[in-house]
Image (cartoon, rainbow, N blue to C red):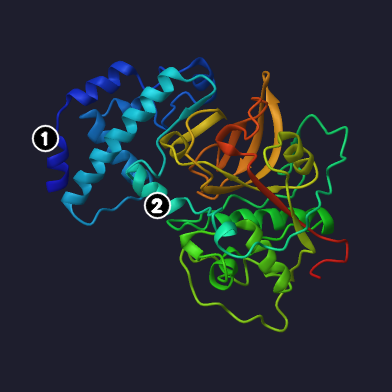
Amino acid sequence: MAGNNSLLAMDSKLSMLFLLLGFVACSPTASHHDPSVVGYSQEDLALPNKLVGLFTSWSVKHSKIYASPKEKVKRYEIFKRNLRHIVETNRRNGSYWLGLNHFADIAHEEFKASYLGLKPGLARRDSQPHGSTTFRYANAVNLPWAVDWRKKGAVTPVKNQGECGSCWAFSTVAAVEGINQIVTGKLVSLSEQELMDCDNTFNHGCRGGLMDFAFAYIMGNQGIYTEEDYPYLMEEGYCREKQPHSKVITITGYEDVPENSETSLLKALAHQPVSVGIAAGSRDFQFYKGGIFDGECGIQPDHALTAVGYGSYYGQDYIIMKNSWGKNWGEQGYFRIRRGTGKPEGVCDIYKIASYPTKNVTGWGS
């Protein structure tokens, strides 16, 4: 109760600001796709003590429980700042829009420290992974105008890494799940937790890693466990020994997509899902709700996703990315980012770091 009284005592002028700006008065594009923008109806916004009511309903929706009234007030202040950014961004944008999600009470610096875990610098500090130097799709021609590996049955449901910088493991696993389905016809959910616990020569669990090292681990370890046999814990654990009769999925190798080449990424993506690193250290990315993203990025690649397709919408070309922050983020866990900008590195450096696993047709589970 003390926490609620503290919230109610705060300046009501900010509530009036948001009402004047209008939560639904964003761009025509955003309104067409998501009328509520922040994920709440006009009835929600008509609650007494507008912002406190919105914060309360948001807290209930996302099962937020705070340790003390002081912590609740702190999170409410962060929530207000984030909400201001969402509303102001949506008023001036047209191609993408932001919304309240489960990160709305997290300060941006906290968010970057907890949820971004791509570490491209590992390849410079440590031994380079020994992948193939070839790019098997270099001579691919007549690419389809659109590809969506979700519709082809090569993508498992969106997963959630939790408050752990394990995006590199999820990106790796999604790419392996994809090529395994393409080769064998069977979609099997695989274990990020095994990579978290066991792939620790160069990768560092919740402290980050790199997909190429993870592909190399899977090769050297003669495969990776299924999700069912080795489920995800949202934290680092102890490496489990392979059981004699455990089901494992193998890969033959992995290859890097040539750097700063949109054409090369599309060639690879036309044939299989691809692990990709992007510069995601911006508040726009934290609160992305939908549309084709071409906004503020980070300084350098710091987050790993999996490219699962590409297409075009009313003349706007995009790449479809599977994220690992649950279905409440973005477009039910997915992200569309603009392509065809003419910048070699692409929006958010999307063409700087990309790789994919390879698998020979040798039968399932081998």
Residue drawn at (29%, 22%) of the image:
18
In the picture of the structure, the residue carrying the numbered disc 2 is 113
Q: Viewed as shown, does residue 80 lie left or right of 333?
A: left
| Label 1 Cα crowd, 10 Å radius (few <14 / some 14-19 / many 20+) | few
User: Mark 1 belongs to which amino acid?
Assistant: Ala
- Write down the quadrant of residue 312 in the picture: top right
Q: Observer-nearest residue: 3 or 356?
A: 356
Question: Marks 2 and 1, how far apart in space?
Answer: 32 Å
Instruction: Point out residue 63 in the picture as x, y percentages from the top left corner.
Output: 35, 50
In the picture of the structure, the residue carrying the numbered disc 1 is 9
Q: Viewed as shown, does residue 364 lie left or right of 71?
A: right
Residue drawn at (35%, 49%) of the image:
110
Which circle's residue, 2 or 1, is located before the other in the chain?
1
Q: Observer-nearest residue: 207 or 343?
A: 343
Residue drawn at (65%, 39%) of the image:
351
Label 2 sits on a secondary structure element that is helix
Label 1 sits on a secondary structure element that is loop
Instruction: Point out residue 16 in the picture as x, y percentages from the top left corner.
Output: 23, 20
Which of the two marks, 2 or 1, is nearer to us in this view?
2
User: Mark 2 belongs to which amino acid?
Assistant: Ala
Q: Are marks 2 and 1 in contact (CB under 8 Å)?
A: no
| Label 2 Cα crowd, 10 Å radius (few <14 / some 14-19 / many 20+) | some
Task: State how many labels appear.
Answer: 2
The image quadrant where one finds the C terminus is bottom right
| Label annotation for residue 45 | none
Instruction: Point out residue 163 in the picture as x, y percentages from the top left corner.
Output: 42, 56
Q: Viewed as shown, does residue 72 lie left or right of 190?
A: left
Placement of 122 over or under 333, stated as above or below: below
Q: Is residue 16 at least partly visible in the picture?
A: yes
- Write down the quadrant of residue 88 in the picture: top left
Placement of 48 over or under 5, stated as above or below: above
